[in-house]
Image: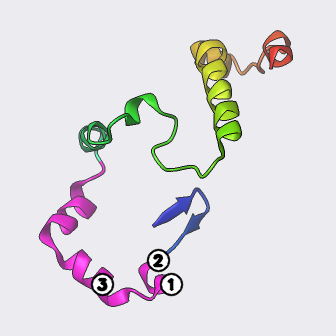
Amino acid sequence: IPMNQGETIRPHELGSLEASDTLFADPAIKKLITEGKTPASMAQAATLLPDALSRNTVEETGLDETMSMVREQFAKYAAERIKPHAHGWHLRNEYIPMDVVNEM
């Protein structure tokens, strides 16, 4: 189970090795493991999450209401002021312009 970019929890660490063996023996799970991570399957999986395509994360963040609002404002700012230009800055090996940084 990936927890974040640098941490993974494995079934035996949760004391559930037998349950994981049973799960991994299931033909559908085997197919998912061997064939599952394609752009098409990931897009299909995203459609199964009610509002996943409009959210920055699909998990429950655990943030309180204030921090959730702060996060939403940063996401809105990034979508409006950063995202439209980010790839161009990257291709030109440029930093984020200071006027954009100062707005933050």
- Asked whether residue 19 is drawn in magenta, I would say yes
| Residue 13 numbered mark, or none | 1
Q: Identify the mark nearer the N-term, 2 or 3.
A: 2
Disc ID at residue 88? none
Amino acid type indicated by mark 1: Glu
User: What is the secondary structure assignment of the residue under circle 1?
Assistant: helix
In the foreground, 29 or 47: 47
Query: Where residue 46 sits: x, y (%)?
Result: 32, 39
Instruction: Please tell me in which quadrant of the rendered image residue 6 appears.
Output: bottom right
Quick check: 11 left or right of 90? left
Whether residue 91 can be seen here: no
Please, what is the three-letter code of the amino acid marked with disc 2? Arg
Sooner in the amino-acid sequence: mark 3 or mark 1: 1
Q: Secondary structure at mark 2?
A: loop
Q: Which circle marks residue 19 in the picture?
A: 3
Residue 25 at x, y percent in the picture = 19, 79
Estimate the spatial distance between the alpha carbons at disc 2 and disc 3, rounded to whole Å. Answer: 12 Å
Q: Nearer the viewer, residue 1 or 97?
A: 1
Contact flag, marks 2 and 3 (Cβ < 8 Å): no
| Callout 1–callout 2 Cβ contact below 8 Å | yes
Q: Are marks 3 and 1 in contact (CB under 8 Å)?
A: no
Query: Chief secondary structure of the magenta span?
Result: helix
According to the picture, the residue beneath numbered tag 2 turns out to be 10
Extent of the magenta region: 10-37
Q: Is residue 69 left or right of residue 16?
A: right
Q: Residue at x 78, y 13 (%)?
A: 100
> Neighbour class for label 3 at 10 Å: few (<14), some, many (≥20)?
few
Q: What residue is drawn where x is 22% and y is 55%?
A: 35
